[in-house]
Amino acid sequence: VAEANASASIMLFQHYAVPSRIVEQGTEAQHRELLPKLASGEWLAASAWSETGAGANKKNLSTKARRLADGDWLLDGAKSFTTSAGIADLYLVLAQTGDPEDRATADTGYGAAGQTFYLVRSGNPGIRPDTALRLTGMRGSATGFVSLHDCRVPDTDRLGPVGAAASIIARVRESGAT
């Protein structure tokens, strides 16, 4: 695919990285609900990990996830260079779950050890894809920014344990699918 169309290749590569993570870390309910839609092409997935100012250094993420009294999560932040921004049905969002001001009471610490992945549906209130970027050589790919403002995510849409994103990222890098 890449030889014929680099834009289509990167979109497919990014799409298939998400169901792979769900297979590895998802619950049975996530498998039953999401995998058929993603495998059939009914839904398109996107990885929303990168941030302006953090780049590839996941230790400097500014997107935060705060646990609410009912167990759900509230996400706030902005993601950059998200392939399929605005056209994806499901975003795999990386967020900081630790509190840098209160390390003693945080769910997990701060930095890479305190990060968690969330499966955020495009219809969730509080998620908004922003302006698409015009990338040289990749104009067929909808790459852009994604804003999260008071984006409520049910705990059932958390991927893997709280604070376990670093181990998931390590497996992604081993497989070559970032």
Image (cartoon, helix red, strand yellow):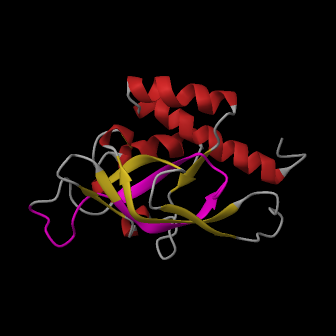
The image quarter in which residue 12 lies: top right
With 177 as the anchor, is 111 left or right in this view? left
With 129 as the anchor, is 23 left or right in this view? left
Nearer to me, 135 or 91? 91
Q: Position of residue 176 (x, y in %)?
A: 60, 43
Which residue is farthest right? 4
Q: Which residues are magenta?
A: 75-104
Nearer to me, 70 or 35? 70
Q: Is residue 106 above or below residue 80?
A: above
Is 99 magenta? The answer is: yes
Q: Is residue 18 above or below residue 68?
A: above
Instruction: Give the tally of numbered discs.
Output: 0
Q: Where, quadrant-wise, is the N terminus in this rendering? A: top right
Q: Position of residue 78 (x, y in %)?
A: 48, 69
Q: Position of residue 131 (x, y in %)?
A: 66, 71
Report the residue at 71% width, 70% height from top: 133
Report the residue at 9% width, 62% height from top: 104
Q: Position of residue 58 (x, y in %)?
A: 42, 62
Nearer to me, 74 or 104? 74
Is 132 magenta? The answer is: no
